[in-house]
Structure formats: structure tokens, C-alpha cells
Amino acid sequence: MTTRGVLYVHSAPRALCPHVEWAVAGVLGVRVSLDWIRQPASPGTWRAEFSWQGEPGTASKLASALRGWHLLRFEVTAEPCPTAEGERYSSTPELGIFHAVTGMHGDILIPEDRLRAALIRSRNGEADLETEISKLLGKPWDDELEPFRYAGEGAPVRWLHQVV
């Protein structure tokens, strides 16, 4: 069984770009050459997108291979398949890595034990429930990555059709 996904490198220093390609190639077992373009949200950095296909769990292997580089901002997604839920990994230098399980429509699925823990922290006065749920949904990562997600000049643009 295979799944597919996308690696979004939102920003990487130029010197790190070949290392990213080598890490991705090491996970996928094939030579990888990314189309790097300048990242206008962070001058001096580069961005790339790469569609991949592999076994379920490939997204986690890609995220693990890339997570050690502090100056890298990236996201890895995997579509659900008959044997596995979808996944989303987001990483920033400031926040570290975020992982979410996603359903067939891209919605984040939060396990009940994590929701219960958030409720308990809220009831005990340790945290605000809205803040806890925001973290479970990855909002701090989305907020930090949003300026980097917009396509820069010359970036390929993928048009999606809304399904209602």
C-alpha cells in the first residue's frame, strides 16, 4: 500500500539546500533535485515544494530526517490511505515540530486523551482551554508559517478547486 504527500520547504539557507535534498533522497531511496526559488518572506533563504509517493509512515521519516536543522522551516503532509490516516508535520526554528493526524478531508483529528489532558489542565488553572485547543490544532505553527506559505515571484502556483 502506498500514500502520497508533499514536502514544503518554506525557508532554508542556501548552504542547507543540498543537505535537504540528500536527506529526502535518503528517506525515499531515489535521487532528489528540488527546484529552489528565493523566499521573499526571509531574504537570503530559499523555498521548494516536492510531491512524493511512498509507504505509510514516509511523512514521519521525512520530518525526522529534517527536524535537526534549526534554521529550516518546513511542512510535510501525507494523504490518508486504506491502511493509515493522513498526517501533517510542521516545523519552525522557534516552535520545533508539530504533528497532527488528518482525516480524509484534511481535518485535524485530535485523540480523546489529548483533549482530556487539555481539559484537566484548564480545570486545574494550569492553562486556558482556548490556548490548549489552539496548540492541539497547530495554530501557533500556522501563524508562524503563514507568511512563508505565499508563493513568491516565480513560484509555481497550484490552483485548487473548492469542494462543498
Image (cartoon, rainbow, N blue to C red):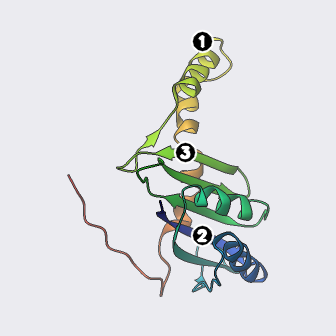
The amino acid marked with disc number 1 is Arg
Q: Image point 57% across, 61% down: which residue?
A: 76
**Picture coordinates of residue 58 (x, y %)?**
60, 61
Name the residue rendered at 22%, 56% in the picture: 163
Q: CA distance from mark 1 to mark 3?
A: 24 Å
Q: Secondary structure at mark 1?
A: helix
Q: Residue at x 74, y 83 (%)?
A: 18
Q: Given this view, does label 1 or label 3 mark the residue nearer the observer?
A: 3
Instruction: Name which quarter of the figure residue 66 lies in.
Output: bottom right
Percent x, y of residue 143: 55, 52
Q: What residue occupies the far left of the structure in this picture?
A: 164
34, above or below 3, in the image = below
Sooner in the amino-acid sequence: mark 1 or mark 3: 3
| Closer to us: 109 or 119 | 109
What residue does disc 3 label?
100
Residue where numbered disc 2 is placed: 10
Between residues 112 and 45, which one lies in front from this camera angle? 112
Q: Name which of mark 3 and mark 2 comes first in the sequence.
A: 2
Pick whichever, 63 or 42, lies toward us.
63
* Three-letter code, disc 2: His
Indicate which disc residue 29 carries. Answer: none
Say which quarter of the image contains residue 17: bottom right
Instruction: Check the image and name the residue furthest to the top.
Output: 124
The vertical placement of 80 against 44, above or below, is above
Q: Tell me residue 148's x, y (percent).
A: 56, 67
Which residue corresponds to mark 1?
Answer: 123
Q: Amino acid at mark 3?
A: Ala
Instruction: Describe residue 162's horizontal placement relative to residue 28 as left or right.
Output: left
Q: Secondary structure at mark 3?
A: strand
Q: Residue at x 61, y 15 (%)?
A: 120
What is the crowding at mark 2: few (fewer than 14 residues within 10 Å), some, or many (at least 20)? many
